[in-house]
Amino acid sequence: MIFVFVFSFLVGYLLISKVPQRLHTPLMSMTNAISAVTILGALLLFAVEMGPVEKVLGAIAILTAVFNVTGGFVVTDRMLKLFKKKEPSE
């Protein structure tokens, strides 16, 4: 499991570091979807019997995924506001 985690971290870092600046907003929207899946998976894990360590790790997973989703929506909303036409002042 540690190998899978380290490998996915390295591949993810290499892929994201090569994304041009103008594509970061669509990438953020994609990570929102991935974080939503993480939240659902962590919530499903709470439905089964587990020890305190697993509960703490699950809670951390949920909190960080919620933080990512919230931040992603804030950034996406700010970017979309840049493309709205400004109404003329009366």
Image (spheres, rainbow, N blue to C red):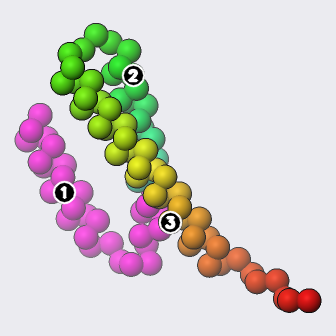
Q: Which mark is residue 75?
A: 3
Circle nearer the viewer, 1 or 2:
2
Q: Position of residue 88 (x, y in %)?
A: 84, 88
Residue type marked 1: Val
> Which secondary structure, mark 1?
helix
Residue range (magenta): 1-30
Whole-angstrom CA distance, mark 2 to mark 3, is 28 Å
For the point 86% across and 89% down, the residue is 89
Q: Position of residue 54 (x, y in %)?
A: 22, 24
> Which secondary structure, mark 3?
helix
Residue type marked 3: Val
Q: Nearer the viewer, residue 32 or 64?
A: 64
Q: Residue furthest left?
A: 3
Residue type marked 2: Leu
Q: Which mark is residue 44?
A: 2
For the point 24% across and 57% down, the residue is 12
Q: Earlier in the sequence, mark 1 or mark 2?
A: 1
For disc 1, the marked residue is: 11
